[in-house]
Amino acid sequence: MNGYEESVREVAVPRELGAVADLAPVDGSGGPQWLVLGQDGRISRWDPVTGQHAVLAATTVPVETEPEGHRGERIRRRLHASGDGDFAAVVNDYGRFGELLDLRTGEVTRALDGQSYNSWTVPFSLAFVEHQGRCVVVHRTDWNRLDVSDPGTGELLTGRPEAGFAEHHLDFFHGALYPSPDGRRILDDGWLWHPIGIPAVWRLDRWLGENPWESEDGPSRLDLCDRAYYWNHAMTWIGPDRVAVGGLGDDDDDMRAGARIFELSATANEVLAFEGPGGRFFSDGTRLFSSDDSALSAWDPTDGRLLGTVPGFSPTHHHASGRQFLELEGGAVRLLAY
């Protein structure tokens, strides 16, 4: 990506949107757009190229105080959005509460509660996915339990008898969720005692269509690797069947910057590991992008070659379908269209 330095530009956030807490990419009729969560709780739709914007709703998620024994991660507001921008979720990462909103009406459709047991160790597990032409949202309802709801009505789609949770008990703290580009799988950056970070994958289509316990112990559930005291770090899908996981090593005390590439079929096979990528991971379906404190870098995930860099640009958000990188730092926005 050498030569893109001159394409990075600062974008003025419209004064009406206020201070920016978070953003989420959505598709618009005129091109890529972003949902903006303001520090005041308002949710707006914004096109950073044209400057057009509109306030759609406001969140009522309660402010949470830091739990005792917190290990450095701070509770922060996080914005998630469906691809078409009709629905949003605002959650307290490393906290307990959140809510779903229908942005067509501005109404809250469901209050979310991930419960409080060790919630400070992981972001609030949530992801929007399109399943059989229908938008659904996967979200944590307990430290070791995920459910799926309809974001338009708030209806729970994965009701299971409580008696079954003893038989299908999962000793696993759900973390950040990453749906595959085709919506068939979920990647979960969770952990279990002692503690060990274990990225896990399972089939969403089987969960919703065949086995209500697929996310606990279904046959499609695969553990990719295990790293002592290491989770809440970079990972991304590269197409529907490959995952890049950040970090080379087996322990937080002995971890090097790099990427491990896993091919998924009936098993999870590590096909490549290479040094270099650090910080956040993104992908356009073919390339792996890493964003650390010094640069945005592009890598070939088939052989580990460095394809290019954009020095001095450290994006925090990626609009994959709209081909935009966005850096949010202290409320200021820098944009790269590629």
Image (cartoon, helix red, strand yellow):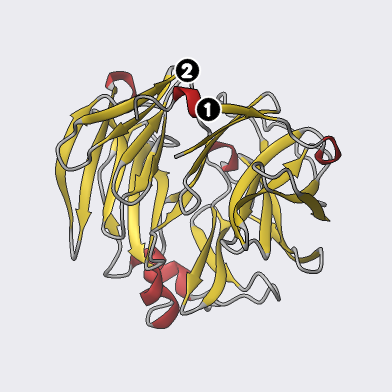
Label 1, on which residue?
Answer: 8
Percent position of residue 294, x then y:
43, 17
Disc 2 residue type (three-letter): Gly
Residue 176 located left or right of residue 219: right
Of badges 2 and 1, the one in the foreground is 1
32 versus 148 height, above or below:
above
Which residue position holds label 2?
Answer: 312
Measure the C-alpha gap from mark 2 to mark 1: 10 Å
Secondary structure of the residue carrying numbered label 1: loop
Q: Quadrant of the C terminus?
A: top left
Nearest the eye: 129 or 303: 303
Q: Please say if the residues under marks 2 and 1 sit with CB atoms less than 8 Å apart.
A: yes
Is disc 1 surrounded by few (<14), some (14 to 19) or many (20+) residues within 10 Å? some
The mark total stands at 2
Provide residue 84's location: percent of width, then percent of height.
60, 64
* Amino acid residing under circle 1: Val
Q: Is residue 175 left or right of residue 28?
A: left
At numbered mark 2, what does the secondary structure look like: helix, strand or loop? loop
Mark 2 neighbour density, 10 Å: few (under 14) some (14–19) many (20 or more): few
106 lies left or right of 101: right
Task: Name above or below for residue 51 compared with residue 269.
Answer: above
Residue 232 in the image: state x and y as whole percent. 45, 36
Residue at 67 percent across and 58 percent down: it is 88
Measured as percent of width and height from the top left, residue 51 is found at 73, 43
Q: Residue at x 55, y 42 (%)?
A: 123
Of the image marks 2 and 1, the number of the one nearer the N terminus: 1
Residue located 47% across and 74% down the image: 131
> Can residue 71 be spotted in the picture?
yes
Left-right relation of 39 to 232: right
Q: In the image, what residue occupies the spot 47% across and 17% down?
A: 312
Which quadrant of the rendered structure holds the N terminus?
top left
